[in-house]
Amino acid sequence: MVEQGQAYADFREGDRVAEYGLGALIVGGAAAVAAKKGFFAVIAKFLIAGWKLLLVGLVAVGGFFKRLFGRRAN
């Protein structure tokens, strides 16, 4: 049960409120995860995923040009 004066309906203009919002809580949570896993481990995981996508893209572009300019058998 909520104590007297602590309910949402008991809010009055001028009451002290927290100076942070939901965004700060989310950023703080992400920072906590990065600190727990290790900041550089999180960055390395992101870069590894990026290189895989880049490699797949390069292979696809190479295949396109090979098919476009390759010799055709008669």
Image: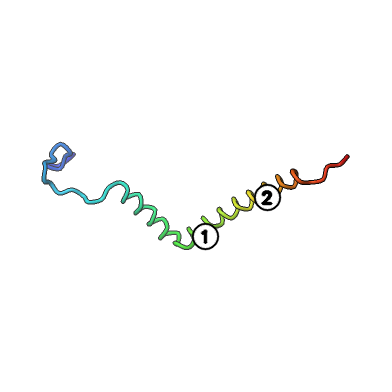
Q: Earlier in the sequence, mark 2 or mark 1?
A: 1
Q: In x, y percent, where is residue 53?
A: 59, 50
Q: In x, y percent, where is residue 26?
A: 35, 49
Q: Is residue 72 found left or right of 55 in the rendered image?
A: right
* Structural crowding at the residue carrying mark 1, measured as other residues with C-alpha within 10 Å and reported as few (<14), some (14–19) or many (≥20): few
The colour scheme is rainbow
The amino acid sitting under disc 2 is: Val
Q: Is residue 3 found left or right of 21 in the rendered image?
A: left
Q: Identify the residue position indicated by label 1 in the image.
A: 44
Q: Residue at x 74, y 43 (%)?
A: 68
The N terminus lies in which quarter of the figure? top left
Between 1 and 42, the residue placed more toward the observer is 42
Q: Residue at x 47, y 63 (%)?
A: 40
The amino acid sitting under disc 1 is: Ala
**Image position of 44 with respect to 10: above or below:** below
Q: Is residue 45 found left or right of 58 in the rendered image?
A: left
**Image position of 67 with respect to 31: above or below:** above
Q: Is residue 33 found left or right of 65 in the rendered image?
A: left
Q: In x, y percent, where is residue 43?
A: 49, 59
Q: In x, y percent, where is residue 7?
A: 16, 39
- Counting labels gives 2
Q: Residue at x 36, y 52 (%)?
A: 29
Q: CA distance from mark 2 to mark 1?
A: 23 Å
Mark 2 in CB contact with mark 1 (< 8 angstroms) = no
* Structural crowding at the residue carrying mark 2, measured as other residues with C-alpha within 10 Å and reported as few (<14), some (14–19) or many (≥20): few
